[in-house]
Image (cartoon, rainbow, N blue to C red):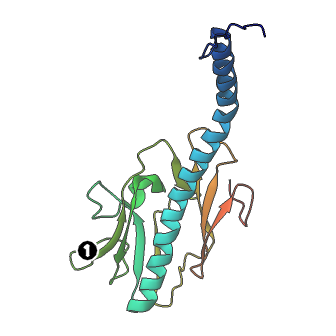
Amino acid sequence: MSEMLPKRRNFGYTMLELVMVIAIVAILATIAMPGFKYVTTSNRIASEVNGLLGDMQFARSEAVKEGQTVTVCIAANANLNSCAGAAAGGNWALGWIVFLDTNNNQQVDANEAVIRAQPAFSGTDTFVAGSAAFNSVTFNRLGYAPTGVTTIISLHDSTANPNWTRCLAVNPIGSTVTEKAGVGTPACN
């Protein structure tokens, strides 16, 4: 038998293999980034609109439970202890408060308790009512929101992309729903 020299085996990766792996990872990351942005923006928008939806539904149930009017209004300041009124111009991104409105004047008085509060949005999203006069919603003891018309509050991201636009609709019977852009009567836009 002939003696064979044992072959020496090298371990590790060549520079070409490393460059190819880095190139493939870079390509995949470039493809995935737009999808990831969609997911994060969509989740943020959904969280923000659902926050107001939950507080509206809470206010309505408290009005029925307590047998008195409950108001949700745009907050006037960072202390979240008073309503902004007409000065807010329908900008719900300033934050809002829910309070027992015993005298039905849409303002927090000394004897009225604030039962929930949401601070202002920290980002660039806009959350504006279709009417600048829509700065508060009051639910009576029967759970109705006697506004006379369905009011839409539109939530947009900084790009105003309709794929991420969501609206909160409040109708006169006190029902609140969220809608995507182009859906509902009146339409979410």
Sort mark 1 into few (<14), some (14-19) or many (20+) by Cα contacts within 10 Å: some
- Asked where in the image residue 35 lies, by quadrant, the reply is top right
Q: Residue at x 74, y 61 (%)?
A: 183
135 sits left or right of 119 in the view: right
Q: Is residue 40 above or below residue 73?
A: above
Q: Is residue 153 left or right of residue 32?
A: left
The residue located at (52%, 53%) in the rendering is: 127
From the viewer's perspective, is residue 121 above or below residue 147? above
Residue situated in front as seen by the camera: 131 or 129: 129
x, y percentage for residue 158? 56, 39
Q: Residue at x 60, y 17 (%)?
A: 11
Residue at position x 65%, y 23% in the image: 26
Secondary structure of the residue carrying tag 1 is loop
Horizontal side, residue 145 vs residue 17: left or right: left
Q: Quadrant of residue 147?
A: bottom right
View extreme (front): residue: 1
Which residue sits furthest right?
1
Name the spot of residue 161 as percent of width and height, x first.
66, 42
Q: Quadrant of the N terminus?
A: top right
Instruction: Please state which of residues 147 and 60 is positioned toward the viewer in this rendering.
Output: 60
Q: Out of 60 and 89, give the one closest to the viewer.
A: 60
Instruction: Identify the residue position indicated by label 1 in the image.
Output: 109
Q: Is residue 160 visible?
A: no
